[in-house]
Amino acid sequence: MKDLLLNFLNKYRYHFLVWVVFIIYEIATLKLLGVKSVSPQTHIYTYSLYILLFYFHAKILLKYILESPNKTLQYSLMFLIPIELLFFITIKYQCDLIFYKYENPSFLKGYRFDLTSLSRMIYRVIYFVGYSTGYYFLVRTRQRRELVEKMELQEINNLIQEKEIKNELVLTQNAFLRSQINPDFLIKTLDYLYKETLKSEPIAAESILSLSQIMQYALSKEASTGFVTLEKEIILIENFLLLHQVRQVNQAQLNFSYTKECLSMEFIPLVLMTLTENILKHGLLDDPDKPAEIKITCENSVLHIETSNRQATNSKIPSYGIGLKNIKERLVLAYGETTTFDYHLDSKGDFHTSIQVQI
């Protein structure tokens, strides 16, 4: 409750300040004019009623009527304001009788609700309603100006964003053109090197051929589409493993197996590549008795891809995080609820992944 009160006071601090200055000004003016002073309680009571009228007129009546899309309701404002004035005068008169009955009973003996007192009350009501109307239009003008400034700023941001998008598009187009030129030149160069080294260095020639095939597949239209046959993915992995083994002094212990039934199945590209790279990067592959495994099978139109490998010392599952998260997101986008992807580190220190997809 205390926090709410503090927030309220802080939010409307300028309102309180203006009202305090206004009330002090009026009281000081009355004293200078020689008007008989009244008790503080009377000032609090009187100004409370007029302040309520001020905010009712601005925040409720004008706001509701003038901001309504109903034109008929807007035109009715000229009739509603006199009703508002009459209603307030009636309430104030009744409140005066109750207040002075307890605050200053002697005042009621000389209190008369005649034309003079009515005129003074109407003047005060119109006085505060006039200020309230000015306050409403001042706030509304400021809000509209802020809205216009916000819209202009948004338009500027949109133009900047549009320009950035165009710049990025140009850069992307340029990068695409470069990707069409440089890889084509590189692939032709690799083919030339393969032919030149085939007789003198057959092992190196096979490595060059594998690299060329990997690049051709990665840059092909098939790899950029949604699905490819598993046969092409398997050939990619075999070429990739061949290149890896050539570069190693000690052969990596990794078994890659698949069934022929899976070759014709279509699957999203480069998932097997990510799993294979994770094994080669994070796995212990030096034990012939405990080789890593990549196993692809299918049964009843359900594709199973499973991997396992010993975890390298001081390596934890989070090191796999980005690639595995990417695989999971791609599987969900491609297959929805018909796919599952799980991975875990068992108590023996072996890391396992398992993909099941209803094809």
Image (cartoon, rainbow, N blue to C red):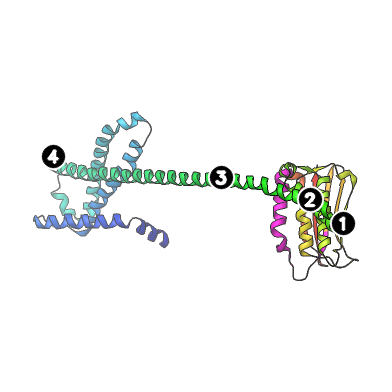
Q: Amino acid at mark 3?
A: Val
Q: Secondary structure at mark 4?
A: helix
Identify residue type, mark 1.
Pro
Q: Is residue 144 above or below residue 4?
A: above
Q: Residues within 10 Å of mark 4 (few under 14, many from 20)?
A: few
In the rendered image, which quarter is residue 7 located in? bottom left
Residue that mark 4 sits on:
115
| Amino acid of disc 4 | Leu
Q: Alpha carbon of mark 1 to alpha carbon of mark 3: how far?
A: 43 Å
* Residue under pointer 3: 170
Secondary element under disc 2, as helix, strand or loop, is helix
How far is mark 4 from mark 3, CA to CA?
81 Å
Q: Main secondary structure of the magenta part?
A: helix
N-terminal of the pair, mark 2 or mark 1, is: 2
User: Of callouts 4 and 1, which one flags the residue occurring earlier in the amino acid sequence?
Assistant: 4
Measured in 3D between alpha carbons, the distance from the residue under mark 4 to the one under mark 1, in whole angstroms, is 119 Å
| Quadrant containing the N terminus in the rendered view | bottom left
User: In the image, which residues are magenta?
Assistant: 308-335
In this figure, which residue is indicated by the disc labeled 2? 192
Of labels 4 and 2, earlier in sequence is 4
> Quarter of the image containing the C terminus?
top right
Q: Which quadrant of the structure image shows residue 207?
A: bottom right
Badge 3 element: helix
